[in-house]
Image: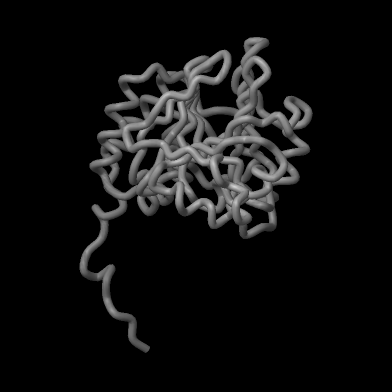
Amino acid sequence: MAIELYNDGRHVCLLFNDLVDDTNSSAVQANQFLIETDGEGALIDPAGNMTYNALIMAMQAYFPFKKLKYIFASHQDPDIVASLNKWLMSTECVLYVSKLWERFVPHFCTINRWEGRIVGIPDAGMVIPIKDTKIHAVPAHFLHAEGNFQFYDAKSKILFSGDMGASLVHHDEIVRPITTAAEFQAHLAKMEGFHKRYMVGNKPCRFWANMVRGMDVEMMVPQHGRWFKGKEAIGAFLTWIENLQCGTDLISQDTYRFPVA
């Protein structure tokens, strides 16, 4: 079942939250996103092979998957885009991914299947017009991948934020957004450990938060867990993340010791 994030009759943004059975599985829960705008379709972070068939079936109710035109990948991880080969075989889509990874993601693909169908996003980002909106590839380097982008839909004002804002929850908890600072504080325990380990350090977190404050964001929707709706919840997250000590801030020589029996 899809969660409708935005729908004005011509432009629709959907979240698929339950295509991986995380009840008795070692696989991490992941969200996939479909933007359907005036007859054109784009997937954001479509995930891996275990999700491919379920995603096709789920999106068919809203958009014919064979007409998919774009895939946007925040980075190169398997839970982001390991299903790339299947999408390239079944559709005529083009992948947009950081230029840092454009020579790595073909390792997911059959020889020659990817040629001419991968667009490397420059480090500064870019704007991709698609029918009734523009998708902005927003720099999010080192949060958590070296070459990392988030995708902002100008029509819906949704920032699809990749691993930034992610939480480790069961998919049933994702049916409603976080809307207040109090809800954010109650949710924090499900986010903190993830961000301390997967974000590289406080410096990129601060620069990223400064950038997002200058954007008109109504929703921030991560690739794992619950999403944030409204200025209060998003503001609470930005204040927290810009002050978080994480990644290399937390390491010492004790992190790098030769293991012995």
Residue drawn at the location 43% of the way across and 20% of the way down: 217
**Left or right of 43, for residue 139:** left
Q: Does residue 218 show up?
A: yes
- Name the foreground residue: 1 vs 48: 48
Q: Position of residue 214 (x, y in %)?
A: 31, 20
**Left or right of 51, for residue 241:** left
- The quadrant in which residue 165 appears is top left
- Name the foreground residue: 150 vs 235: 150
Of all residues shown, which one is farthest toward the top?
9
Q: In the image, is residue 238 above or below residue 75?
A: above
Q: Does residue 233 show up?
A: no
Q: Position of residue 178 (x, y in %)?
A: 51, 28
Residue drawn at the location 48% of the way across and 45% of the way down: 190
**Left or right of 120, for residue 41:** right
Q: Position of residue 51 (x, y in %)?
A: 68, 47
Q: Position of residue 258 (x, y in %)?
A: 29, 80
Q: In the image, is residue 184 above or below residue 219?
A: below
Q: Pick the quarter of the image with the C terminus.
A: bottom left
Of all residues shown, which one is farthest toward the bottom?
261
Of all residues shown, which one is farthest toward the left?
253
Residue drawn at the location 74% of the way across and 25% of the way down: 62
